[in-house]
Amino acid sequence: MDRERSYFLLLNIGHFLDHLFTLVFATVAALVLYKEWGVGYAELLAYATPGFFAFGLFSLPAGWLADKWTRDGMMCVFFIGIGLTSIATSFAQTPLQMGIGLFVIGMFAAIYHPVGLAIVTTKWRDTGMRIATNGVWGNLGVASAALLTGYLIDNGGWRMAFVAPGIFSIVMGFVYMTLRWQGINAERKADSKNAEVAAKPSASYRAQLIRVSIIVFLTTAVSSIIFQSTTFALPKIFDERLQGLAVNLSSWVDSILGAGEGDVATVIGSLAFIVFAVASIAQLVVGRMLDRFGPRRVFMAVAVIQIVFFSAMPGLSDGIALAVAFGFMLGAFGQIPINDFMIGKTASGAYRARIYGVRYVVSFTVLAATLPLIAFVYKNWGFDTLFLILAAAAIVIFIAVSILPKRLPTPEDAVAPAE
């Protein structure tokens, strides 16, 4: 494997680990700690909240440090820092100690998105496909967290669930450092040189950049509402809407295997997993389309898909509800790489990591705030109203994206022409 492929692979592994580390505690708390420590599951989750808060909040200073120092250097800090912190967290004896460990894990986890994406969008030309591929690795980290953590709990205890990925991350950090040592020094020199020759941007470039930035951050916030609502609520939606289908599938499986009474909950969970897994592939399709057609048309198409399927979902059940759920989840996952693509194309290299930092502060703040929204809407009106709200959110995205310029402003457009 050549150095460029190794470089991209390590960045993808970083995204996988980033989401894995933030979810290890969820499984540990659910399976072990509530019994071992005699603390209720809901109370344990409260100690994880500051870690998720840090995951978003510290994205901005991480991006600023990466732009001021070196991005590859910050990636080394990410790998080694989050690994050491995970191992240290394994020694926790009380919920408070665990909460402190999770908070520091969240601080190091915050490094990845602004820094890793800044590298991906700066280093390679096929930006859309690279971002999409990187995003799929992050999804694999989410999907694998419970599986890997459960395995480590069964074969080494809950502390090993923090120690094993921690050791692996530290090793990856030193591999990354070895691969990129020359690049780290070259990047520092290049950034210093670029800072000296920075040119004043033209008025037209500034106007277009402001226009695009407003759209990017607006759609980031609204897209986060859609993504969190669909991914968090889908298992419950399926539990309500697919009972008939689940019973039939369970009976069919039992008749083939000669088993007894079917497990409907397992079937519903399996259907949710299949929808998530298949829909995540939409990122790769969207990534390819971004490189070919640009963000405006692709984002509008994704918004239309969301509008159609969210509007169609109220009142549906069983097979048709499953089919429609596939549709809106394709839209929810497909939108993920688009804003990162636009930031990568428009942001100056000298500021790209910190702009990604702002993007993820917005995104993770909205993700956290969406959970109370889901609970409130469901309690008072049910999921049909939530689907209509999400369709309205997709309409907002469509309108906002429709006023994007056909060609995004790039850093090369920033220099005012000579008079």
Image (tube, rainbow, N blue to C red):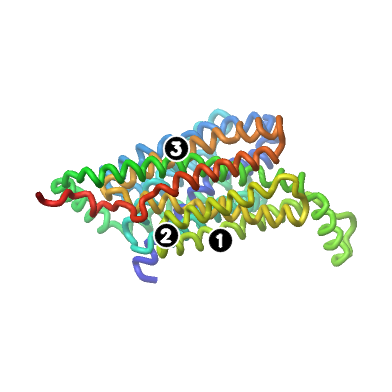
Q: Are marks 3 and 2 in contact (CB under 8 Å)?
A: no
Residue at the spot 55% in from the left edge and 56% down from the top edge = 140
* Residue beneath disc 2: 128
Identify whether 50 is placed above or below 278.
above
Identify whether 98 is placed above or below 195.
above
Q: Are marks 1 and 2 in contact (CB under 8 Å)?
A: no
Q: Label 3 crowding class (10 Å Cα cut-off): few <14, some 14-19, many 20+?
A: some
Residue at the spot 61% in from the left edge and 31% down from the top edge = 372
Q: Secondary structure at mark 3?
A: helix
Label drawn at residue 218: none
* Residue beneath disc 3: 362
Label drawn at residue 281: 1
The alpha-carbon separation of the residues under discs 3 and 2 comes to: 21 Å
- Say what amino acid the circle numbered 3 marks: Val
Return the residue nearer the eye: 221 or 165.
221
- Say what amino acid the circle numbered 2 marks: Gly
